[in-house]
Image (cartoon, helix red, strand yellow):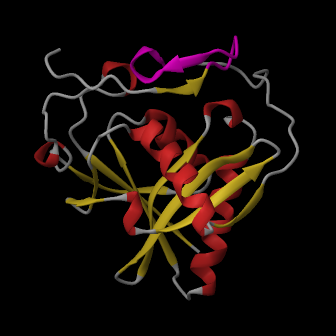
Amino acid sequence: MNDAFRGPAVLRCGRCGRIAGWDDARVQIVCGCRARLELPPPLVREAGEGDRARALDIFSREFGDRQLVAAGKPVSVEDGELLVGETEDGIAGALSWRRLGGVFHIIALATDPLWQRSGLGGTLLAEAELIAKRHALARVLVTITNDNIPALYFYQRQGYRLAAVLPNSVAAHDRTRNRVGFAGIAIRDEIQLTKDL
C-alpha cells in the first residue's frame, strides 16, 4: 500500500464505543438492538465567523488532505456556506453546501466521533433541506467517494437515491494516488445521490 491514505480516527464503534480508525473500520450486520445515544438535541444554525475554524477542523479531521470531488471537479468545503451543529460541548458537526446550477449541493457533512449516532448528522441534513426549500431548490445533490459505505447507508436511510457513479473521477484528482479509505477500499469513484424535495 504505497502512499496509502491512512485516514484519521472518525468513527465510533457501535459495540464498544471506542473511536476507530477509518481504515480499521468494518461493516457489520446487527439487529435493531444497537444502542442509540440519547443526548440533548443540538442547535443547528448558520456558521458565524467564530465558528468557521472549528467547522473546518472537523472537516479536516474527517477528510484529511483528500481532494474532494463533485461532478468530476475538485471542490473545497471552504467554497460553500456552512451550517454547524452546536452541542453542550461546542461545535460538534458541520455541513458545507453551495448552489450548483439549479440544485442544492451538499459538499460535505461531518460530525465529531463523540457525537455520532446521536442524531446530529440527521439534524444538520434536515436543516440543509429546509434551506434548499427556502431557496426554491427542489433537488438536493450529495457527492461521496466509493469507499464511504457509512455515508452511503446514512443518506439512503434519509431518503436519498443513487443518481450516478463517475468512475475514476476522484482518482484523477488525487495528488498522491493509490489511496485507500474505509475498510481498505481504494478511493477511485464519485457516487452521486439525490433527493427531490
Q: Position of residue 11 (x, y in %)?
A: 56, 27
Mark yes or no: residue 28 visible.
no
Drawn side of residue 129 relative to residue 68, left or right: right
Residue 31 placement, left or right of 155? right
Name the residue rendered at 47%, 67% in the picture.
97
Residue at far top of view: 16
Q: Is residue 64 above or below residue 12?
A: below
Residue 18 image offset from top left, x and y in percent: 64, 14
Q: Magenta span has 38?
A: no
Q: From what the image shows, is residue 113 above or below residue 34?
A: below
The picture quadrant where one finds residue 19 is: top right
Residue 188 lies left or right of residue 98; in this view the side is left
Between 109 and 188, the residue placed more toward the observer is: 109
Q: Residue at x 39, y 26 (%)?
A: 182
Q: Where does the image place residue 157, in percent across and percent down from the top left?
A: 61, 47
Main SS category, magenta section: loop
Comparing 186 with 197, the one in front is 186
The residue closer to the viewer here, 10 or 172, is 10
Residue at image x 79%, y 24%?
35
Q: Which residues are magenta?
A: 13-27
Q: Quadrant of the image for the N terminus?
A: top left
Res 180 quadrant in image: top left
Residue beneath the point at 69% across and 13% down: 15
Whether residue 19 appears in magenta in the rendering, the answer is yes
* Quadrant assignment for the C terminus: bottom right
- How many numbered callouts? 0
Whether residue 135 can be seen here: yes
